[in-house]
Amino acid sequence: MKKQLVYIITALVLLLSACAGDGEKETTIKEIEDAATTENGAGDDNAVDEEETEDDEVEDESEEIVEDEVAEKLYELGAAWYFKPIGDANPKAVLLTIDDAPDKRSLDMAKTLKELDAPAIFFVNGHFIDTDEEKAVLKEIHDMGFAIGNHTKTHANLQQISEAEQEEEIISVSDTVEEVIGERPLFFRAPFGQNTDFSRELVQNDGMLLMNWSYGYDWEKQYMEAGPLADIMVNNDFLRDGANLLMHDREWTADALKDIVEGLRGKGYDFIDPATIQGVEQ
């Protein structure tokens, strides 16, 4: 507005300047600029202050939105890796987890879970996210809304390797996951459920919640078919409130997944959203 006013009035002054001396012309233009500054009600410094104030307000609003998006914590880990409800959270709920992702069927499993509106954690191995194609699968699973966990680089038994090797097994996976999806894993599960004092401290320092599982069956020969696996996952003595279910990226598990989810819901179970688990910040 200031520049437009100056241009208009300056043009008028130039038309009249033929009858005036050079000194009068300079004085007149300076007066015009001063008037234009007064017209805006404040100098440039104040205008910048107003812009900064508006920017600050936008930033404050963004911070408020982020705070609002932080999920309420509804569950915490208890004995034998079962979850306990916090406050009024539904106690009749279980956690679904998929290990050894993303091997051959993880993306299919994620799509099945998405269609069924069933949240889960996908625990990844570093040797399954070596290539660009594998990294793209990991990102797609994450972009579908699923939590990503760390399951070590090569699925090594942490109790049988050195501390330096344990660090490489764990931290390298978190680094790669962060590179692919823009955030580090929030959960850690050791292969075979075998941790060490060193790995526990390392996992905690890297911001992950360590967990094992309540039950799982898909590595046993008699359950390497969809029908028997779905049946045992829904009908066993370990299924109770807060159970932490272990499954793997396996053909038979992928084929049984829909029946497992529907069978659990048929028994009245809800599914725990990993974002609502106490001990992880997003």
Image (spheres, rainbow, N blue to C red):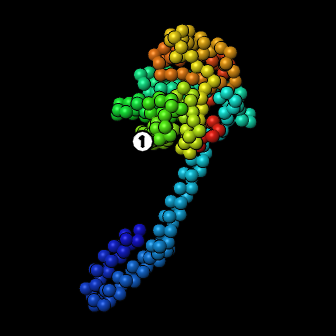
Query: In the rendering, at what x and y percent does residue 273 appear?
Result: 60, 32
**Residue 146 visible from this viewpoint:** no
**Residue nearest the viewer, comparing 12 with 272:** 272
Q: How many marks?
A: 1
**Residue nearest the viewer, comparing 217 with 34:** 217
Name the residue: 54% across, 9% down. 222
Q: Is residue 158 left or right of residue 135?
A: right
Q: Look at mark 1 in the image and give the residue it sits on.
A: 179
Quick one: quadrant of the C terminus? top right
Name the residue: 35% across, 32% down. 131
Query: In the rendering, at what x and y percent does residue 175 appear?
Result: 44, 42
**Residue 277 visible from this viewpoint:** yes
- Say above or below: 95 vs 2: above
The local crowd at label 1, few if under 14, some if 14 to 19, many if 20 or more residues have their Cα within 10 Å, is few
Name the residue: 30% across, 76% down. 11
- Say above or below: 30 vs 204: below
Query: In the rendering, at what x and y percent does residue 238 appear?
Result: 67, 18
**Residue nearest the viewer, comparing 37 with 148:** 148
Name the residue: 68% across, 15% down. 237
Query: In the rendering, at what x and y percent does residue 224 appear?
Result: 50, 12
Q: Is residue 254 left or right of residue 118?
A: left
Picture quadrant of residue 251: top left
Residue type indicated by callout 1: Glu
Q: Is residue 152 left or right of residue 3?
A: right
Quick one: quadrant of the N terminus? bottom left
Residue furthest right in the image: 87
**Residue nearest the viewer, comparing 17 with 235:** 235
Give the secondary structure at mark 1. Answer: helix
Q: Is residue 213 left or right of residue 178?
A: right
Residue furthest left in the image: 18
